[in-house]
Amino acid sequence: MAKQWHQLEKLDHRSLKKLQQDRDKAAALLRGEAERKRKLVVAFAVMFAFAVLIVFVVILKQRGAEQAFQEARKKLYISMVSQATGRTFGRALGDWDKVSKGFSFDSEYTLKTEKDGFLVVELQLKNLLKLNANSEMVVFKPELNKKVNLVIKERAKLKRGEVTVAIALDGRDLLEVEAGGMVALGASGLYKILYNRDKDEGEVVVKNGLVEVYSKRNPKARVKVSGFYKVTFTRGTLDRPTQASVIQYDWR
């Protein structure tokens, strides 16, 4: 009988030991699973933080690039008076103010000269507008490409008097100068526009290079005027080009 009890106790001890081992094993598995989950959570948190950091850096770079883009864009709107002698004036709105060499503007601006006045406006691509005495013109804000910082059109309007236009190498086919409903587009070279506002008549004289002249009412019908030729216009009507004695004009 004692032997049987001893055998039962031995079996119970083995069972308890095995049960404890199973419990320890299960607990170890639970701890391992918990540790794995903890590591996954930590890894996910690190990855999330890294992703947020990357997004933040990208946003900062985009904002910086956009700011630099806009700042560079603003500079392309600037035109400057590179020369001014005598009585020269300008205004955006309101009263006329004295204009001197070095004056700059970045929006539509009107300039005029008295009988002793002369001024030169330098546009972004080095095209020059030389306003002679007793003259008035409007220089418009240039037109830029919507996606890149590039000037695609420059415009001015001679309201009365005389302006000499010098086309730079980088400014070809960009500058349109209007007078009396006519537009002169400089492909190259040096040309002059004279306009009598009272009589509503004028002429475009080309010293060298090539200029396309057309009416705003019919921009497709263009007249090409080359060096030592001129074209006259009266009340919106454009005549045929004729030879011109360019030495009789002031080309300074």
Image (cartoon, grey):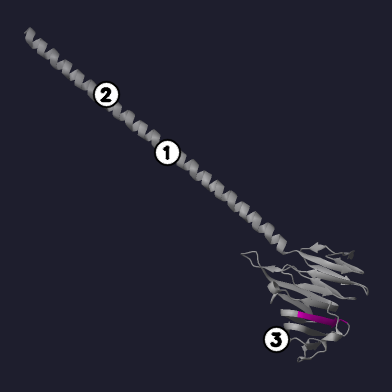
Q: Which residue is mark 1?
A: 43
Q: Report the amino acid beneath label 3.
A: Arg
* Marks 1, 2: nearer the viewer: 1
**Quadrant of the image containing the N terminus:** top left
Q: Which residues are magenta?
A: 190-197
Front position in the image: 16 or 73: 73
In the rendered structure, which disc, 3 or 1, sits on the residue that comes first in sequence? 1
- Which residue is label 3 attached to? 222
Which numbered marker is on residue 120?
none
Instruction: Look at the image and say whether residue 10 sits in the magenta stretch.
Output: no
The residues bearing labels 3 and 1 have C-alpha atoms spaced at a distance of: 70 Å
- Residue 121: x %, y % from top left: 80, 69
Q: Is residue 95 visible?
A: no
Q: Secondary structure at mark 3?
A: strand
Between 215 and 70, the residue placed more toward the observer is: 70
Q: Residue at x 77, y 79 (%)?
A: 190
